[in-house]
Amino acid sequence: MAKRDPFTIDMFQELPPAPVSAPGGLACRAEIAHTMSEALKGHDRYEIAAKMSRLLGRDISKHMLDAYTAESREDHIPPLDTAIAFDLATGSNTLVEFAAKKIGAKLSVGKEALDAKLGQLERIRDEATKQIKQLKKRLED
């Protein structure tokens, strides 16, 4: 068995939960509001709204952000493009990570994503090496 590199991220250290399948399990408006509210801590809402407006090419006001983050505002759920703009404007992956957990996935970004791809390619290489050895052995027999 190969020695584990202590500097390589273990993407399976925390496994993602099972996808939501219970009836009404995706009625998560209050969770979205809470998640957005937490992500906005330490940020100026006017500044985040301005960044989102630039990214979307349409006006997002502080008032709209307040509505998205109010758990009581059942009628204010951010559309997907707005959620993406929110994550970019806050410099986080808050909403995309939230969505990933709901579908039973884990988000990998940057070095973690490269590490996952490297691991996948190494497994493919190892399997190919194993098959090559088996074929060579059969040819020798």
Image: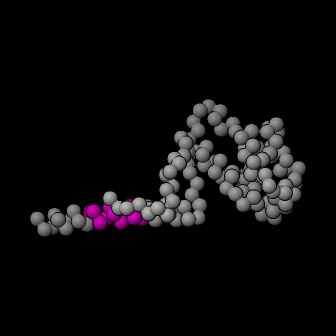
**What segment carries the magenta color?**
121-131
Horizontal side of residue 107 vs 68, given as left or right: left
Position in image of residue 70 (x %, y %)? 82, 42
Q: Looking at this view, is 8 or 105 the one in front?
A: 8
Position in image of residue 24 (x %, y %)? 65, 33
Q: Is residue 43 visible?
A: yes
Q: Residue at x 65, y 47 (%)?
A: 98
Colour scheme: one colour
Residue 124 belongs to magenta span: yes
Q: Is residue 60 visible?
A: no
Q: Looking at this view, is 119 or 21 the one in front?
A: 119
Horizontal side of residue 139 vs 42, given as left or right: left
Q: Main secondary structure of the magenta part?
A: helix
Horizontal side of residue 113 vs 37, given as left or right: left
Numbered-mark total:
0
Hey, which quadrant is residue 129 in on the image? bottom left
| Quarter placement of the N terminus | bottom left
Horizontal side of residue 120 vs 39, given as left or right: left
Q: Residue at x 59, y 61 (%)?
A: 109
Q: Residue at x 80, y 45 (%)?
A: 69
Position in image of residue 138 (x %, y %)? 16, 64
| Quarter placement of the C terminus | bottom left
- Outermost residue, front side: 6
Position in image of residue 80 (x %, y %)? 71, 52
